[in-house]
Amino acid sequence: MEIDSYIDLYRGGLLNNVIPFWAQHSPDVRYGGYFTCLDSHGNVFDTDKFVWLQCRQVWCFSMLYNKVEQKQEWLDTALLGAGFLEKYGRDQNGDWYFSLSREGAPLTQSYNIFSDCFASMAFGQLYKATQNPEHARISVDTFHRILSRKENPKGIYDKNFPGTRPLKGFALPMILCNLVLEIEHLLLPELVESTIQNGINAILHEFYRPEFGLILENITPDGHFSDSFEGRLINPGHAIEAMWFLMDLAERSNNKELAQQATNITLDILEFGWDKKYGGIYYFLDVKGLPPQQLEWDQKLWWVHIETLISLLKGYLHTGDERCWAWFEKVHEYTWTHFADQQNPEWFGYLNRQGEVLLPLKGGKWKGCFHVPRGLYQCWKTLEAIREKKSSEIQFS
């Protein structure tokens, strides 16, 4: 497929398929916020509202308004979610709940700091559209609260016995590398730089293990390998997603060495995580090849594949490594054949190892208006950048 055809596919998939699906079926015009539990046709099958998905959708429609076109209906959709979150989303400490009832009553405590991460991201992006100082204040206050909790993010809700096998997870330093760029316009420059450097250091010098050539999901507090279920866990999608975050940081500082390192790690993880029998990328693996504890380890998930497409395209853009383009075409073919619904809008989320649809939902407790639209946007814009770069190379060759 020619690059122009890829651009048309990703742009059209975003603007003519995925976003109209969420814009039509998701808004709760009665109580505010969004329905995310939607079947293959967009029918609501559960009305609980998961705060991190509410935040992600606020971010998504704000981002489209800011970066694609200033459509009033996109901003109105973002404000519908933001108003609901402002009213019901936080506890008395300012921490964001995990889930709410349709009407906004708390259902699940603020045990998960990722609600906070996406709240900060959402209100930071929304502020760019509205210039409402309250949106900026919520974003910044939440970010500082995240930093204050990062050493013990679950707090009283941590189920592990203290002191026996303490571990620190990859997800938070990974997300902070992306979040700090999202709200850079609201933060002091020195805080931005320290957060970036701490994130890069954690990813490349703690969680990345040269002896395996892979990124671990959990390590000991002093940065060592833990030979346990949790310590041996590899989440290929998480690790590859983090690599395009690093590539964006590399682009920001014109750090070609960092871009190359992130590209090489992407390719190594993908080679390790690719199912050579059925195709697609495994959800979880054990770094030693032992049986993982997660029973869903061999499922194929939507977000893993769309995030991989982003990293491969950005790797190709920044390094010109032809392996990235070859892998992109391979992952693209699998993704669009298996996840994109050929009869109805949006994508399926969950496949079995053989690539068959496990659940016909388009949204639920974990899947919302985020990875697919963000991925389509990122791929669209990165493909355009690749086309422009190639055009310039031809012009000046």
Image: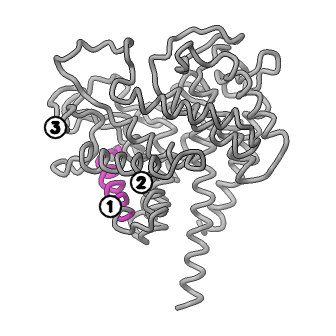
Estimate how packed mark 3 is, as few (under 14), some (14 to 19) or many (20 or more) residues with alpha carbons within 10 Å.
some
Residue 44 vs residue 344, the one in the foreground: 44
Residue drawn at (68%, 46%), measured in percent from left and top? Answer: 63
Mark 2: amino acid: Leu
Q: Which residue is mark 3?
A: 224
Q: Can the viewer see residue 18?
A: no
Is 12 colored magenta in this rendering? no
Task: Establish if 287 lies above or below 336.
Answer: above
Label drawn at residue 261: 1
Residue drawn at (20%, 38%), measured in percent from left and top? Answer: 223
Q: Secondary structure at mark 1?
A: helix
In the picture, which quadrant includes the N terminus? bottom right
Magenta residues, start to end: 259-275
- Residues at marks 1 and 2 touching, judged by CB atoms closer than 8 Å: yes
Q: Which residue is mark 2?
A: 246
Front label number (1 vs 3): 3
